[in-house]
Amino acid sequence: MDWLEALRRLREAREPAVIVTLAIVRGHAPRNGGAKMVVSRGAIIGTVGGGNLEATAIDRARSLLASGSTDPELITLKLSDKTTTEYGVQCCGGEVTLMLEPVPVVPAVAIFGLGHVGLELARILARQEFELHLIDSRAEMLAPERLGVPGESGVLADAVALVHVQHEPVPEAGLAALPTGAHVLVMTHDHVEDLAIVDQALRREGLASIGLIGSRSKWARFKVKLAELGHDDASFARVSTPIGIPEVAGKAPATIAVSVAARILELVERARADDDAGDEAGDDAG
C-alpha cells in the first residue's frame, strides 16, 4: 500500500496520522530524498530507511499524535558512528532532515435536509476540509443530477470534503453513522422530521453541536414536545436555534447558508483553539 492510499484509508476511518518525509539528504543515507512513511497510532506504512533515524521519526510522530499537535516539524539526524541516539548508531555517513506533517481528523458536519437552504449550504461546506454527510428522506433531493458529481459538474463539482450522500426514509436513523464530535444541522422540509431528528440527536452522546433552522416560535413549540419526550432545560441548551450568526441577516437560501456556514467554521476554529490552549497548558505543567 502506498502512502496516499494509506492516508485515504486512515481518513475514512477517522484516524489521525503523521506523514514523515525524507526532505533533505546530505551524503549517504538509506533512502533517497522524498521517501515517505505514514505513522498512525497503530500502524506504520512505508519506510524512510529503517534504523535509528526511522525509530526516532516514529517516536516523535507518535508524540505528535498523542498531543494532538497540527504543526509540522523538522528533525535533522547525523548518520555517523560518532553520533549515538536513543535507538543506537547508524553509520551511513550522511545527514538527513525529516519533515513530520500531522494529518488530523477532519471535522464532521451532517446536513439533514437538502432543500433550498441545505443545497446552498452543501455547496459551501463541500469546499472545506470536512467530512460532510448529506441526509434526506427524499431520494430526489440527493439525485446526482441535482447534487452533481465531484470533478464534473454541480454543487459537489469542486468538493474538497469527503462527502457521504445518505438517503434515509427515516432521517434520524442517519445519526447512527455520524462520528463522535460531529456537528448536526437540522433543516428538513417537515417539522415532524425536524423534531424527530432533534429528539434523537439529544439522546446521542458526543455530538459537537446541534443546530435547528426555524423561528423562535417553532422552537417554543418544539420545547413543549421535547419535554413530553423526556428532555429538560439542560438538553434544550444543546440546541442552537435559529442557526447562523446574527451579523448575517436575510431570508434568501444562499444568505442563510452563508450565515450557517460561518457559524460552523466559528465552532470548528474555537474547538481547535481550545485544543491548542490545552496543549500549551500541558506543556507548561510539564
Image (cartoon, helix red, strand yellow):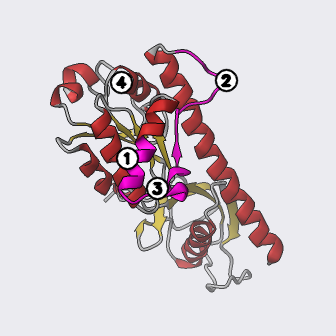
Q: Find numbered disc 2 in the image and state the secondary structure of the residue it sits on.
A: loop
User: How far apart, in angstroms, are the residues tagged by discs 2 and 4?
Assistant: 22 Å
Mark number for residue 188? none
Mark number for residue 247? 2
Residue 85's image quarter? bottom right
Q: Nearer the viewer, residue 219 or 252?
A: 219
Task: Tell whether 177 sits left or right of 57.
Answer: left
User: How far apart, in angstroms, are the residues tagged by discs 2 and 1?
Assistant: 30 Å
Image depth: mark 3 or mark 1 in front:
1
As drawn, 257 above or below 276: above
> Would residue 185 be seen by someone viewing this image from the given angle?
yes
Residue picked out by circle 1: 225
Q: Earlier in the sequence, mark 2 or mark 4?
A: 4
Image depth: mark 4 or mark 3 in front:
3
- Residues shaded magenta: 222-250
Task: Tell whether 134 sits left or right of 35.
Answer: left
Q: Find numbered disc 3 in the image and state the secondary structure of the residue it sits on.
A: loop
User: How far apart, in angstroms, are the residues tagged by discs 3 and 1?
Assistant: 21 Å
Q: Find numbered disc 4 in the image and state the secondary structure of the residue it sits on.
A: helix
Residue picked out by circle 4: 119
Which residue is depicted at the point 54% across and 55% down?
Answer: 233
Amino acid marked by disc 2? Glu
Bin the neighbour count of mark 3 within 10 Å (Cα to Cα): few under 14, some 14-19, many 20 and up: many
Q: Earlier in the sequence, mark 2 or mark 1?
A: 1
* Quadrant of the drawing holding the N terminus: bottom left
User: Picture coordinates of residue 113 (x, y %)?
Assistant: 32, 32
Residue picked out by circle 3: 207
User: Picture coordinates of residue 271 (x, y %)?
Assistant: 62, 52
Bin the neighbour count of mark 2 within 10 Å (Cα to Cα): few under 14, some 14-19, many 20 and up: few
Which residue is depicted at the point 70% across and 84% down?
Answer: 84
Image depth: mark 2 or mark 1 in front:
1
Given contact means CB atoms under 8 Å apart, are the residues at marks 3 and 2 in contact? no
